[in-house]
Amino acid sequence: MTGAKRLLWASLALGFIGGYVDTVGFVALFGLFTAHVTGNFVLIGAELSRPSTGQGQVLLKLLVFPTFVAAVALARLIALRCERTGTVASRPLLITQAVFLTAALAASLGIVDLGPRAPWAMATGLLMTAAMGVQNAAGRLAWPALTPTTVMTGNVTQVVIDTVDVLRGAAGPDVKDRLKRFIWPVVAFGAGALAGGVAYMGWSFWSLLLPLALLIGLVVMDVRPDKKV
């Protein structure tokens, strides 16, 4: 398998994980976005406008942003250490993401009262957020050519623009290649979102085992931009 095909598989797997984990967090944890963290600001505003129903959920959403920032900073420090030691950052970052997701699953086992201020529920949501923060950063630090895999708004915009150019016959090879690269993570993210919702309804937080398995597969595959097989 060539390096380009490995990157395609990584893009599909990470897009699926992004949609899956974001949906599990949203369904399980009171509308919490663990990947698209800025979306929580909108939800905070909406909940504060309904003080009789929403304020109990605000604290968790407020804590998500600094948690996400800390996870991105950690990913950057890991990448810098890899630069100093002459190693590739992709595998250490995937392992770090898997560790956070494993910790989130472990924290979920302690949940007795699934309320917005329940300590184990908050820990689960914040650890899921940390995992997605590492994935967000890894796309820039380990695979700079990789299409974004966690927030799809920009991807969908680019897909629509390029599709219009293809349909009007004004697209060159570079545009067609970009369309192929951008459209598949969108499809994978959507599939992950659907799967995450269904899986949580059936298996609660044990549903996190699937993205963990995918991460382990990527670690074993050792996806890196410069690797040719």
Image (cartoon, rainbow, N blue to C red):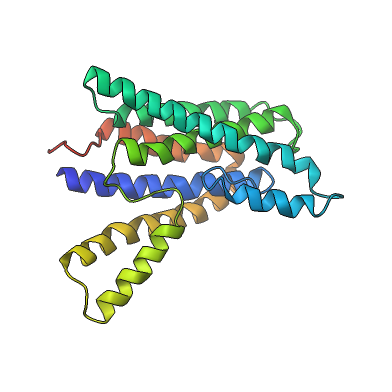
Q: In which quarter of the image is residue 218?
A: top left
* Residue occupying image coordinates x 63% and y 48%: 40
Question: 46 above or below 209?
Answer: below
186 horizontally vs 58: left or right? left
Q: Is residue 1 at least partly visible in the picture? A: no
User: Where residue 130 sits in the image (x, y, percent)?
Assistant: 52, 33
The residue positioned 51% from the left and 56% from the top of the image is 194
Relative to 163, residue 92 above or below:
above
Q: Seen in the image, is 166 located left or right of residue 135? A: left
Give residue 84's quadrant in the image. top left
Location of residue 166 in the rendering, given as x and y in whole percent from the top left corner: 25, 75
**Which image quadrant: the C terminus?**
top left
Give percent across and percent down for residue 213: 40, 36
- Residue furthest top as drawn: 85
Quadrant containing the N terminus is: top left
Q: Farthest bottom residue?
A: 168
